Image (tube, helix red, strand yellow):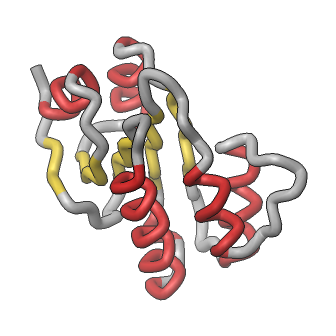
Amino acid sequence: MSSLTVRLARKKSAVLRSQRSVREIAAVGERAGWTVVVLALEAPTDKAAFLDKCADAFDLPDWFGHNWDALADCIDDIQHEPGTLVVFDGAHHLAEHDLEVVRQIFTERVDLGPQPFVVVATSGAAGRDTDKP
């Protein structure tokens, strides 16, 4: 059993990095019964475009303010059972400063609870742990 499968079974929040495909990671989450959110960047992406992608991917409310603080507030409100798995692909398309803010927002949400929140970064985004296939 992979470390991602074990982490989801144990309902442990984390920020991870993986060499697996988006489809493989999403399938692990779906098999575990988690809500799966795919956040995929395919080209250089500025802050405004990234926030628009987040609004769509996370199905954020109409009052979402399209700024970092509003994103953090909305992400904090995501409390799906048994948990939420975010597959973050192509993070390297963000400017380093924006990527650092996104890492911070996701890390704070992972630490928040109560429902588990796992972010798996693919294609070069940094995380706290490494998930090896």
Q: Nearer the viewer, residue 51 or 68?
A: 68
Residue drawn at the location 87% of the way across and 57% of the way down: 63
Identified at 64% across, 74% down, the residue is 68
Position in image of residue 119 (x %, y %): 38, 48
Query: Could you tell whether 107 is left or right of 129 in the image?
Result: right
- Position of 100 with respect to 39 (left or right) is left
In the rendered image, which quarter is residue 74 located in? Answer: bottom right
Hey, which quadrant is residue 66 in on the image?
Answer: bottom right
Residue 50 percent location from the top left of the image: 66, 65
Q: Quadrant of the N terminus?
A: top left
Residue 106 left/right relative to 64: left
**Outermost bottom residue:** 97
* Residue 79 placement (x, y as % from top left): 54, 36
Residue placed most toward the observer, 31 or 9? 9
Q: Quadrant of the C terminus?
A: top left
Location of residue 59 (image quadrant)? top right
At 28% from the left and 48% from the top, the residue drawn is: 14
